[in-house]
Amino acid sequence: MISSSHVEAFRIALSSILAHKLRSFLTLIGIIIGVASVVVVGASISGLNSYVIERVSKVLGVNHFMIARMAGTGNITEEQWEKMDRRNKKIDWLDIDWVGGHCDGCAEVGASASQRQDLKRGDQELLGTQIAGVTANMGMIEDKTIGEGRFLLPHEVEHAKSVVVLGMDVRDKFFLGREAIGQTLKIRGVDFRVVGVEAKRGSMFGQSLDNLAYIPITTFQRLYGMRPSLQLHGLAPSDDRFDDTIDDARVALRTRRKLRGNAEDNFGLVNVGEVKGQVNQFTGAIAMVVTPITLISLVVGGIVVMNIMLVSVNERTFEIGLRRALGARRREILVQFLIESAVLCAIGGVLGLLLAAALSGVVSKTTAIPMTITSGYILLSLAVSSVVGIVAGIYPAWRASRLDPVIALSRTT
């Protein structure tokens, strides 16, 4: 419970801080930088996590999983990869049709295949465009957003039509400033009619997600042959049934390939949920390493505060002696200097938060990574700064409370 003596101690502490504004501010620089560092690092990690998960969702969609000949999440060693390469079989249309007919939990089952291709139209050229052959339901499975026109239709896939849906990079390169729908674009010497343009997806770690084009997978196989392995894509009907749906698809494909008992899968599985879990684990590991390092600056700031508080005790020896002579107890002197140290660091914590908010705003506006200041890092930085203030003030406060009144009054400076 707060007593009148505590209120008086707070008033005296605040008056002392305001009486030496410049010194107090210089003392707080370490605390300000420490708190700002902790909060900005936390905002960066949280923002990086949101950024990667958002980009992964844009690439893979929601409640979507993929089965391919070579696929996996997490750290895969070279030995494991070579083992998979020897063991795994390519995915073909029989696999796709079997899983589509036997995966009871799947809302959709589709297929894709891809190939890098340089595109040229007139005297303009775009290098390394990803040509993706897809089934018509891939727009739904990967939750694609179409900015212009439409996505591929089932009959266009069934009859191997020469139609294409462009990524925004391709659209801007060849049809900037004019209507793209209905225009033609050559892919491997074949004229394709543009029926749609995907909305801009942006980039991920500097790699554009918009330099691509979707064509019917049947047309893709006509252009590039039947040998490349397909990728099987599945969509769960809801988030709470996602894991069960993946199990259904996995069991269906194992049954198709007559894999029994403890036999390893001869295919790779990419689970969007596992990818997000890997991202969370990665950013969490960064936080565990970086956050303690940034807290060191708060400790350094606390040492500076302790030094200044010792100077303050020496300067106010006469005042302390006078208060002791007038009846102030050692406990009251101790509390006064502890409060002064804690208030000093709390002010530094608030200023550090304001600096962190300003820096985060600048970074958010100048980069693609959203800086998210979380309440957890705010509470952590304020709590640590307050604890640092109290710890830094313990010795100076104890020293002040132990001063002999007669000796203290005999000093005039």
Image: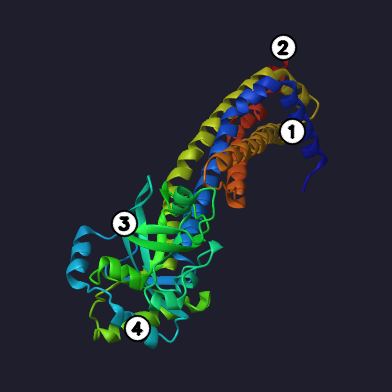
Q: Position of residue 321 (x, y in %)?
A: 73, 22
State the residue position of label 4.
97
Which residue corresponds to mark 2? 412
Comparing marks 1 and 2, which lies closer to the viewer? 2
How far is disc 3 from disc 2 in space, using C-alphas?
84 Å
Residue tagged 3: 116
Residue 242 shown left or right of residue 74 in the figure: right
Can I make out residue 403 in this image? Answer: no
Estimate how packed mark 1 is, as few (under 14), some (14 to 19) or many (20 or more) residues with alpha carbons within 10 Å.
few
Where residue 301 appears, as percent x and y from the top left, is 55, 31
Looking at the rendered structure, the secondary structure element under dot 4 is helix
Residue position marked by numbered label 1 in the rendering: 329
The amino acid pointed to by label 2 is: Thr
Q: Residue furthest top?
A: 412
The amino acid type, in three-letter code, at marker 4 is: Asp
Marks 2, 4: nearer the viewer: 4
**Separation (CA) of disc 1 from disc 2:** 21 Å
The residues bearing labels 4 and 1 have C-alpha atoms spaced at a distance of 87 Å
Q: Nearer the viewer, mark 3 or mark 4?
A: 3
Mark 2 element type? loop
Is 94 on the left or on the right of 383, as rendered? left
SS at mark 3 in the image = strand
Compare marks 3 and 2 and give the one earlier in the sequence. Answer: 3
